[in-house]
Image: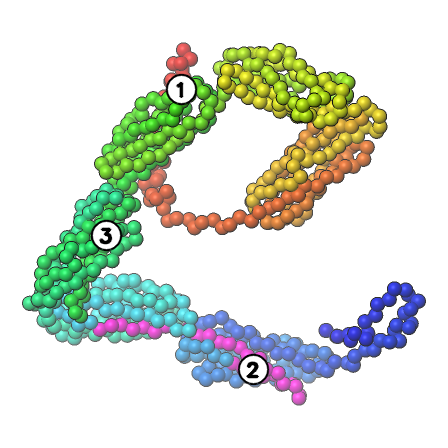
Amino acid sequence: MLAIPPSAVVTTRESDHSSHIWSRASFPSTPTPDFSINASSPTSVDVNQSASSIITVTFLNSLLGSVAITGDPSYRLTCGLISPPEVRGSGIATVSCSATVAGEYILTLTGTSGSLTHQATATFNFEDFRIGASSPTGAVSASLSSTISILALNGFTGNVTITTLPQPGLTCGTITPSNIMGSGTATVSCNATTIGIYILTVHGTSSSLIHSVYATFKVANLPDFSIDAASPTTGSAGQPATSTITIKELNGFTGTVALTDTTSPNLACQSIIPDTVLGRGTATVSCSSNIAGTYALTITGTSNSLSHSATATFNFVDFIMTARSPATSNVGSSASSNVIIGSLNGFVGTVSLTDIASTGLTCDAISPNNVPSSGTTVIFCNATIAGTYVLTVTATSGPLTHSVTATFTFSPDFTITATPSVSFTSGSMGISTVSISGNNFDHYVVLSDQVSPSSGLTIEFNPTALYPGDSIATFHSSTPGSYTVTITGTYGSQSQTAIVHVTVAALATGTPDVTLKPSAASLSFNSGTSGTTTIIVAPQNVFTGTITLAVATPTGVSCVLSPTSISSSGTSTLTCNGSTAGDYTVTITATGGAGPHTITVSVHVAAVLPAAPVPSTILGLSPAVLYGIIGAIIIFVVSGTVLVLRRSSRSGS
């Protein structure tokens, strides 16, 4: 870009000074023609594979002619011809290179045009892996292990598949693992029934890369030992189980075998007793887990250069229980909770159930109170006083004990509603209809009121006490303003409320109009959710027209109003949502009065952290077990519903 010196920068306040200022300006000379050269560094590839670099030549300041490109590769980097070797005008060329040894290489590219010369470099990375294998020595028929190692070279991250080819007379098991990502080790165990030296060929393959190595197995009639670990019978979670370890001598072995163990996650083991065995003998180890499952315990016996391992499997069973909290019910009616018992890792015991209800909650006997392995039981409860109650259910099977809670909520069995907004002129009156309704409710409800502010508005109810039905609330005021009226309906210890917004307008002394205001000047919610506030329209000077509302939102948040048309006075709900975190200003405009009215609402959208990784199980259960439990739930829910309907039918008759 052409640079303008400070002497040429002109700032004027009046146009008649321009001739004086331009006389002070000076301009730079014409820039020299030139060019630039850049080269891309390709992504890493395997050795013996080609990678290409793109060379970009850019002519600067009207350069004429062409640029010749040459390359100088570093040691062991082999490159083909640059195509094209000469670029006329701005353009690109390519060059492909390869290497037989893993590493990072530099290709220096030189561009020449007449006396102009510029350079650029491209970096080439070639990956590979190295394979190795240990050569064990052991006795005839003994299991001998070779450790196969894979070493990544120059950032190699490929998947290496390992295969073996044993010499006749050598019998080998499965390689564990047979695939290694990047670097790592694997093992393979082999044995032979006759003395000799045997060769195991090990191949490592990853895409186009293939490497091989030889492991030598020397088999002789040497003193050795064998090891075995017994798997105990299935036990309950949290209870110990014991494995017996047996050491036997081979070919006159008389050494001391030291015993160590390697546990699976969530398996806790005590010390091996004894932890050494001379020649032959037994030892024991006790393990437990608080989580149902199948766990492997690897026991390793070591005597000088000899090492052998055995695996014992521990199975622990348990059961899981959940309790469903029923929906809110009316006082005096019955609600039910389903308690679900699920088998974990093959649990087959019988689960006995007991419950403890909080004060004020009365429950029927659990039916059934014994569940074999898995299933569902139902508990019916009721309360005479509105409130929230907790039922604790305890399940026991042998040493296993679990507890869950279910929440029962009982609400007053009548509801109260009222005309939500009333407007009238000072000195006149307004009316709201108050309605009482309920489910089989046939008692008198007494109405009372509370006004904020406390003076300026009076209320009369007709009637003041009523069965389910309607009462007329009449409002009188000679003081203009906005009032919030809380109407309370009371029956015994039960009560419900309804809110009425009352607007008293002054006698018309000016142009009829409205006021516009939000119930909350700001909204805040998480990204991907929504928030709401209420827009209040109040009349002035006996305004009786229709107001039309509109909302304008910036990019990143969207909002809607409902309703968008209000007759004289009322409220509209503003609902906003957004998926991009940030702060926004939303504008609401009202038209239809003396003139447009505008207000703003601040909206804050908060960012939400990523969700946690999805576990490999569902509620600690395998999918098959969980789906079985869900099927049982459906059957028992249907049964429980039928039972509730029968009870309701009996109580109604």
Amino acid of disc 3: Cys
Report the residue marked by disc 3. Answer: 269
Residue 216 seen in the figure: yes
Specify the label residue 645 is tagged with. Answer: 1
Q: Which residue is drawn at 37% across and 49% down?
A: 616
Q: Position of residue 519 (x, y in %)?
A: 66, 34
How far apart are labels 3 and 1 at the CA level? 53 Å
Q: Say if mark 1 contacts mark 2, CB within 8 Å.
A: no
Q: Say if mark 3 contacts mark 2, CB within 8 Å.
A: no
Q: What element carries label 2?
A: strand
How far apart are labels 1 and 2 at the CA level? 87 Å
State which region is magenta. Answer: 107-135
Residue 49 seen in the figure: no
The one of 167 and 136 positioned closer to us in this rendering = 136
Q: What element carries label 1?
A: helix
Q: Where is residue 114 in the image (x, y as percent from the top left)?
A: 66, 88
**61 relative to 495 in the view: left or right:** right
The one of 31 and 453 positioned closer to us in this rendering = 453
Compared with residue 48, is residue 13 higher up or lower down, i.e. above or below?
above
Q: Which residue is drawn at 32% across and 38% down?
A: 320
Q: Which residue is drawn at 52% across and 81% down?
A: 107
**171 relative to 91 in the view: left or right:** left
Ranked by sequence position, the earlier of labels 3 and 2 is: 2
Specify the label residue 109 is tagged with. Answer: 2
